[in-house]
Image (spheres, coloured by chain):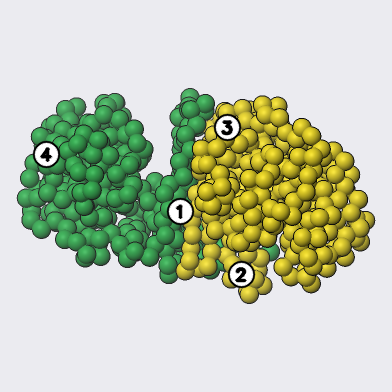
Chain colours: A green, B yellow
Amino acid sequence: MSEILILTETQLRERIPLDASLIDVIEAAFATLAGGEVVMPPILSMHLPQANGEVDVKTAFVPGLPGFAVKISPGFFDNPSKGLPSTSGLMVVLSSATGRVQAVLLDNGYLTDLRTAAAGGVAVRHLARADASRATIFGAGLQARLQLQALRLVRPITEATIWARDPVKARALAVEMSAEGLPTRAEADPETAVATADIIVTTTPATTPILRADWLRPGQHVTAMGSDQPGKNELDPRALDRADIYVADRLSQTRDLGELRAALAAGLIARDAAFPELGQIIAGQHPGRSSPDQITIADLTGTGVQDTAIASHTLSLFA
Amino acid sequence: MSEILILTETQLRERIPLDASLIDVIEAAFATLAGGEVVMPPILSMHLPQANGEVDVKTAFVPGLPGFAVKISPGFFDNPSKGLPSTSGLMVVLSSATGRVQAVLLDNGYLTDLRTAAAGGVAVRHLARADASRATIFGAGLQARLQLQALRLVRPITEATIWARDPVKARALAVEMSAEGLPTRAEADPETAVATADIIVTTTPATTPILRADWLRPGQHVTAMGSDQPGKNELDPRALDRADIYVADRLSQTRDLGELRAALAAGLIARDAAFPELGQIIAGQHPGRSSPDQITIADLTGTGVQDTAIASHTLSLFA
């Protein structure tokens, strides 16, 4: 029997940080997605109302990488009342040549958190103004914190603002980020929080819009991270209409799961409208921001190619 | 961090046999499927022509069981030339209450082989004549052998016949089964092989029919195991029309992946025709065989509920 590498969450946390090399890895993964040879089937999504939970399975085969990941992501929303995080899961890495199991990464969602944050960094690297220094985050959870970390790796961020539905959490995150050397304040009024930003990242479980289109100003970039299910929606659908450039991580997904879904449902955008994907901009197949006054929006729902990329990155670090 | 049980193929082979208790477990799983509370999403199926491979992911949530399996099944068809089996994979068992990983069963497809064979036993238990004693297997692979083992657990089998495209393999299996106490012969003519059988099991990768409808005789039962992909087909589509009772493991799957697909494509059966599922017969919601002269067909494509059932059974034996 061949050796199967089994890594625990603790081992992964010790060895895999959110750093510039990870952002490069995720950027390269999106670029391969634009090449058209990646095989990425639709997400297997299982809703479990009887357990107040859901399970998503994502995968992508990337030619040229030695392995590919199949990721199992459960979300069980009664867990916090049991003292457990809602999300958990693992990644299984299969050989691209033989399909045999190479590794089991028992990450409980840690690698997903990282590759999601790294995608935010990639979007900002390609869409925000080069001089963007003021970041506003909608949301105060773990991903809010990680998004700020990712932004600092790709833009000269000097100050940050947090808006969250729960002002106590917003203040706690502001204190934490300030202690890490980034002057950060909590802002109770979302419109004010937007007004002072070059980059806005929304990372909430909102099901009705929390960011209004008429708050946006020329030159701003918005990354919407929160929506990854048909019921979620963070951006006023008119924001997509107002943006100069709307970019999807995967258009076939954002039509069904992302901010684009709500804009299509509202009839503001034609079902067959063409939009670039992030990988096409990275690969130079489509122009990104071409003027400092454009409003740009990145709609990120999470893709299997990111999972395969971070899993391969992980295996290379443990080899 | 909670304990995750990790079991190797060797441990599983030592501890989990194909026996009557496993057939009961799989039977019970099919019965729950008839209850309507099982959540079983469509199979995630990834085709990888660049690697001459495919990966299927199956899952099912069964209320009342403590855990549910997500099974990853790769098939890479150049593997035999590398000295490896084509199929491999594993099952991940998640808690039904919290979604957290309970176990990783590194079975390389062993549990799939068992639960597939056990389903054949369940189908025969409910559809073949009680006095069925003569079995014919089309196919000479591992599953052919396991199907014979399963039949012997549910019917008084006294003799067996093997037909296979490769007569050398058919003879080898006949010798092996005879040595295990079941008088078995290889038969070169498939029509003759069918003529002498009470039960016929087809377990081949055929893509054009290997069993003709006019070979079938009153009282026979046919279990078609081989087709689990849109391109596969073992039974002459007219056989489904000729049968008194056609039973699917999961009708939504057999319409797309099973023998029913070919019969629908041939226009022999209406797309909206109603057929019972195996679980409905087990649960008494639909009559099974009601006379010794009926011809019955079971069309088995493999279901996630079988994976969850054998995974739960495994965990109970290792608890």
Q: Label 3 lies in what chain?
A: B
User: Marks 1 and 3, Cα distance to the nearest angstrom?
Assistant: 24 Å
Q: Residue at x 25, y 35 (%)?
A: A265
- Identify which residue, B24 or A286, lies in the foreground: B24
Q: In this view, does A220 lie to the left or right of B144?
A: left
What crowding class fits label 1: few (fewer than 14 Cα within 10 Å), some (14-19), or many (20 or more)? many
What crowding class fits label 4: few (fewer than 14 Cα within 10 Å), some (14-19), or many (20 or more)? many
- Tell me the amino acid under the disc marked 3: Val
Which residue matches tag 2? B79
- Identify which residue, B77 or A129, lies in the foreground: B77
| Residue B286: x %, y % from top left | 67, 29
Q: In which quarter of the image is residue A218?
A: top left
Which residue matches tag 1? A59
Q: In this view, does A57 lie to the left or right of B70?
A: left
Query: What is the secondary structure assignment of the residue under circle 2?
Result: helix
Q: CB atoms at circles 1 and 3 under 8 Å apart?
A: no
Compared with A165, A260 (above or below) is: below
Mark nearer the viewer, 1 or 3: 3
- Tell me the amino acid under the disc marked 2: Asn
Query: What is the secondary structure assignment of the residue under circle 4?
Result: loop
On-image quarter of the C terminus of chain B:
top right
